[in-house]
Amino acid sequence: MTTATEVVRGLRKGGTQYRHADVLSIDEPSRTLELAFSSEAAEVQTWSGVEILGHRPGEVRLHRLGDSAALLLDHNPRDQIGVVQSASIDRDQRGRAIVRFGRSPRAEEILRDVLDGIRKHVSVGYLVHQVEVIGQRDAGPLYRATDWEPIEISIVSIPADPSVGIGRALENPPQDTATVSQHTPGTPEDKTMTEPSTPAHADTTNAPQPTSNATDTPNSVDAERTRVRHIADLGKTYGHLELAHDYITQGQSPEAFQRALLTKLTDKAPMPQSEPHTQTGIGLSTQEIRHYSIVRAVRALLPNASQTDRNAAAFEIACSAAAEKTYGKQARGLLIPSDVLNRAFSTTTPTDGPGSNIIATELHASSFIEILRNKTWVMQRATVMGGLVGNVDIPRQKGTTQAYWVGKANHRKKANLPWTKSTSPPNP
């Protein structure tokens, strides 16, 4: 029988799991949806077996979901369209939540689709921290999640597939210690086991090496496949396929192969050069490349973009979707295909050859540029007078006026402003 340790190990490798949620009611004035995101009565098949989510007191961590968790679109953490207002576990052992849409153009668009019945599917993402194996099914062990945590709710175009059950929203799943419990019918009490995290560089020289067993459980088969894949990938990357084949047939662990491979590399064994990466296009024709407009694509991405702008950039958006599938990348905005970029980089004006004979030349005589001459700073302040003969006299005021108080019996004194002149003789 599969142990709870193996179940948790498989769940942790998968990261975040998803389940379909039901929309109970829609309140358009308040822009809110009431959802039922979980139920203890539901049994869902996952890669690790058949899962039941516990809803007893203390089995669900609602703090993260109730603390203004994100309402996402298609489980994309960079595409938040609302917030989770509240979350609770009812007496009927069902998890319920109320989500509210934002007022951004993106959120308004999704809310319109929900109200019009275009987007009908809702999914919840959650993490499992502790399980209890309670039985066996044809698809694998039947386990009950006694400590799990919902972390986000999403409006999705494709609902979570119960036969798949596991997604990878978290790039680095938590690797800390997981507490699991094994429950066997007829046992008076559960046995608690702890799965410690082992460093990858730990010395396992004296540890027994794993061997293949024909009676392995499905999880053991998955672990064997993972071991073989890791060793084969390392051997192919560093050019030691024969060494990798030996370690696979001997049942050695990936850590042991890493140590042997490191020894080979430190002996300065020749490493094959990787082939240069060439990114192919999406197959746009010359006319389609000329029709492509980066300006339209950028205008459609603006926060205040209208539906007209998005319709005008329908071709660019379709090219971005095709580029995502071709390159295996998820765009934060829009991906520009390499077809367009290669044409932009290779389009230059030829200075020689047949192509230069068909380039027109225009003469802008009205924009004639005169020669720029150096001038000293004093010439920018001085006044230049030309055509003078003999001495030059320039009148100049020598003094200023004065103001003062006088008494009633005193007479005002008359004064004249002082004037003079500046004489400039000619310089030989």
Image (cartoon, rainbow, N blue to C red):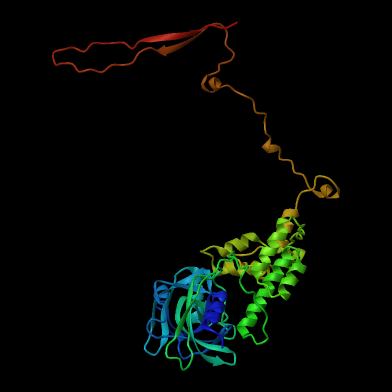
Q: Residue at x 82, y 47 (%)?
A: 356
In this picture, is 358 found above or below 316?
Answer: above
From the image, which quarter does the N terminus lie in?
bottom right
What percent of the width, then of the height, locates residue 83?
43, 72
Residue 90 appears in the picture as rendered: yes
User: In the image, is residue 7 above or below residue 346?
Assistant: below
- Viewer-side residue, 311 vs 182: 182
Relative to 130, say whether 174 is above or below.
above
Q: Quadrant of residue 231?
A: bottom right
Which quadrant: the C terminus? Answer: top right
Q: Is residue 282 left or right of residue 352?
A: left
Q: Is 93 displayed left or right of 18 in the figure?
A: left
Outermost residue toward the right? Answer: 354
Q: Indicate the quadrant where residue 380 lies.
A: top right
Query: Which of the two residues, 211 or 138, is positioned nearer the viewer here?
Result: 211
Query: In x, y percent, where is residue 277?
Result: 74, 61
Residue situated furthest left in the rendering: 409
